Amino acid sequence: MDVSETASPGGFFTLRTQAPVTTGAVPLARVYAGDTGPLWARIEEVAARLNSVETRVAASIAFLGLASRLWSIALAPTVLRGWTPDLSPERLHWDPARTAPDDLWLPEPRPLPVAAEPAERIRDVVHGRHLVPLIAATRQVAPVSERLLWGNAASALGGALGQLYRWCHQHGQRSAAGQAQRITSALLAHPDLRTTGTLTGTRFRRHTCCLYYRVPGGGLCGDCVFTRAPRRRTPGPPSS
């Protein structure tokens, strides 16, 4: 895989294609199989970085970041190169202590079979083999709702589309931009995602909230269901 080409739209689209050089990198299959230590470490790091004391908020944002990476590294090569990398959880390594582009490693990348349509290939490897077990693993370690996490997954996909679509237009690749839009629309039609938001052109508006407004100093994301941050409840007086 030509990392420089698929990474051009931004760091979230970058995929390291050599063996991991960090000692903390683990195959994502290990996390999905029950070793949630790396996932918990990532959630704790996010919580510390954002000064958030709520585990569910940190878990939501940690999930959103990894989901964004997974969609991006599948969508970009599919659109720009015409093939989808095999991102099997056994092969894809993740370092929870690092951020894009140094968090994901795929040694000796190879393409998925082209028998299926592009959206079907991405749905199988990202949605089915990563997001489904990642949601289960996240909910094992944090009290966050499944619907919220699927909303995060849809938001992550919408964000990947927006960035890739703009980059394609800026570089005269209108056909690739249109394909990115069609693939995203097909992916969002899945029952797990289709009620989580609305895609209008390349703009996604979600029907749930990732809880970022609960981060000290945080606000609303660009695709948030809210137009104004909900009031945070303050403790009332002790009951008599």
Image (cartoon, helix red, strand yellow):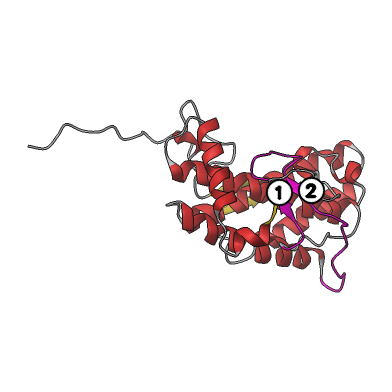
Write down the residue under mark 2: 20
x and y percentages locating residue 23 in the rendered image: 72, 45
x and y percentages locating residue 131 in the rendered image: 62, 59
Q: Secondary structure at mark 1?
A: loop
Which of these two is toward me, 237 or 88? 88
Is disc 1 surrounded by few (<14), some (14 to 19) or many (20+) residues within 10 Å?
many
Seen in the picture, residue 161 relative to 213 is either above or below; the reply is below
Q: Amino acid at mark 2?
A: Pro
x and y percentages locating residue 165 in the rendered image: 79, 44
For the question of whether residue 198 can be seen, the reply is no
Q: Secondary structure at mark 2?
A: loop
Report if the CB atoms under discs 2 and 1 are less than 8 Å apart: yes
Q: Which residues are magenta?
A: 90-116
Q: Is residue 4 left or right of residue 60?
A: right
Instruction: Specify whether residue 97 is painted magenta.
Output: yes
Q: Main secondary structure of the magenta part?
A: loop
Q: For marks 2 and 1, give the CA distance.
A: 7 Å
Locate the C terminus and report the quarter of the image it occupies. top left
x and y percentages locating residue 15 in the rendered image: 81, 47
Precedes in sequence: disc 2 or disc 1: 2
Q: Is residue 100 left or right of residue 197?
A: right
Seen in the picture, residue 228 relative to 157 is either above or below; the reply is above
